[in-house]
Image: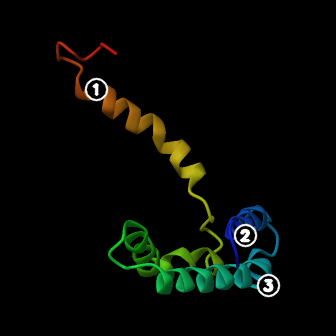
Amino acid sequence: MRGGSHRSILNGNYALSRLSSGWKSTRQARSAPLVAEFGNWLQAQRLRVSAKSRLGEKLTYIHRQWAGLQTFLHDGRVEIASNAIENLIRPIALTRKNALFARHDEGGRT
């Protein structure tokens, strides 16, 4: 895998995750090979990059989270992206942030 082709794998997985009927067979047949290829690419990058560099640290983090990143392949309730959940909790987070300085002199200023 060269250059930005890993992005096409991720984009392919996003498109496949939108398919609702027969999710498991579709994810196993089509997404699993893409995820495996992406995992191989990540491993190759980990071997090339110093583990102490910033990129190496990020690759190590991804490696540690790899099992969780593959959960969407086996559990139909899990989406590949968390956009829907993030949109649901955004109002809660904004209210909490806004309330933090509600009775403070600098609270309403931008």
Q: What's the amino acid at mark 1? A: Ala
Q: Closer to the camera, 54 or 88?
A: 54
Q: Which of the two labelled residues, at mark 3 and mark 1, occupies the earlier sequence position?
A: 3
Tell me which corner region of the image, top left, top right, bottom left or bottom right, holds residue 101: top left
Give the x, y percent position of residue 33: 73, 85
Name the residue that disc number 1 marks.
99
Q: What's the amino acid at mark 3? A: Ala
Q: Given the current orientation, which residue lies at the most extreme left position?
A: 104
Dot 1 lies on which element?
A: helix
State the mark number for residue 26: none
Q: Which of marks 2 and 1 is in front?
A: 2
Q: Distance between the residues labelled 2 and 1?
A: 44 Å
State the mark number for residue 5: 2
Q: In this view, does 101 lie to the left or right of 13?
A: left
Give the x, y percent position of residue 17: 73, 66
Q: How is the image coloured?
A: rainbow
Q: Distance between the residues labelled 2 and 3?
A: 20 Å
Q: Is residue 9 left or right of residue 91?
A: right
Q: What's the amino acid at mark 2? A: Ser
Q: Closer to the camera, 63 or 30?
A: 63
Q: Which of the two labelled residues, at mark 2 and mark 3, occupies the earlier sequence position?
A: 2
Tell me which corner region of the image, top left, top right, bottom left or bottom right, holds residue 98: top left
Tags 2 and 1 touching, CB below 8 Å:
no
Q: Closer to the camera, 42 or 14?
A: 42
Q: Is residue 84 left or right of residue 26?
A: left
Name the residue that disc number 3 marks.
29
Dot 3 lies on which element?
A: helix
Report the label total: 3
